[in-house]
Image: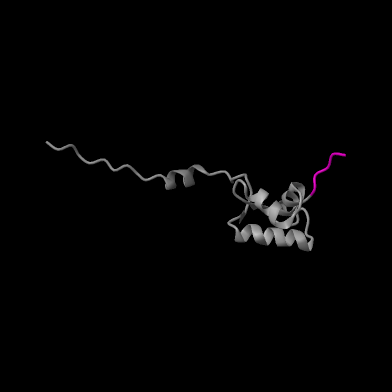
Amino acid sequence: MNYKTQSILSEILVRSGEKKALMEIFKVSHVTIREALRGNITTPLAMKIRTAALKRGGREGSYSTPPVSPQQNKASKPERILEPAAD
């Protein structure tokens, strides 16, 4: 069966190794951790996993970044100021 589940909650991103630590803390499988952090399940245990992940430094977001417009990109770079050459 090939289907895509719709996330109810936003995804929580954690640092490398944090999922394994959460697995050991809550004594659950990597699938449970993954689904909880993706927001695909909302059981009381999943909510505890999400809360712990946020307290341990996780952040809500996604892996994709929004595109940057040329105006935003230009504004983020400092302008180079040219000074007249000394005689």
Q: Quadrant of residue 86?
A: top left
Q: Nearer the viewer, residue 40 or 28?
A: 28
Query: What residue sits 72% from the left and 57% below the top?
Result: 26
Q: Is residue 6 left or right of residue 12?
A: right
| Residue segment shown in magenta | 1-5
Q: Main secondary structure of the magenta part?
A: loop
Q: Nearer the viewer, residue 29 or 72?
A: 29
Query: What residue sits 64% from the left and 49% below the top?
Result: 62
Query: Looking at the picture, how far across and down is residue 64, in whole percent?
Result: 62, 44
Q: Quadrant of residue 59?
A: bottom right
Q: Is residue 76 left or right of residue 84?
A: right
Split into 4 quadrants, where in the image is the N terminus?
top right
Magenta highlight on residue 14: no
Query: What residue sits 70% from the left and 53% below the top?
Result: 24
Q: Is residue 85 above or below residue 52?
A: above
Split into 4 quadrants, where in the image is the C terminus?
top left
Query: What residue sits 43% from the left and 47% below the top?
Result: 76
Coloring applied to the structure: one colour
Q: Is residue 24 above or below residue 83?
A: below
Q: Nearer the viewer, residue 26 or 80?
A: 26
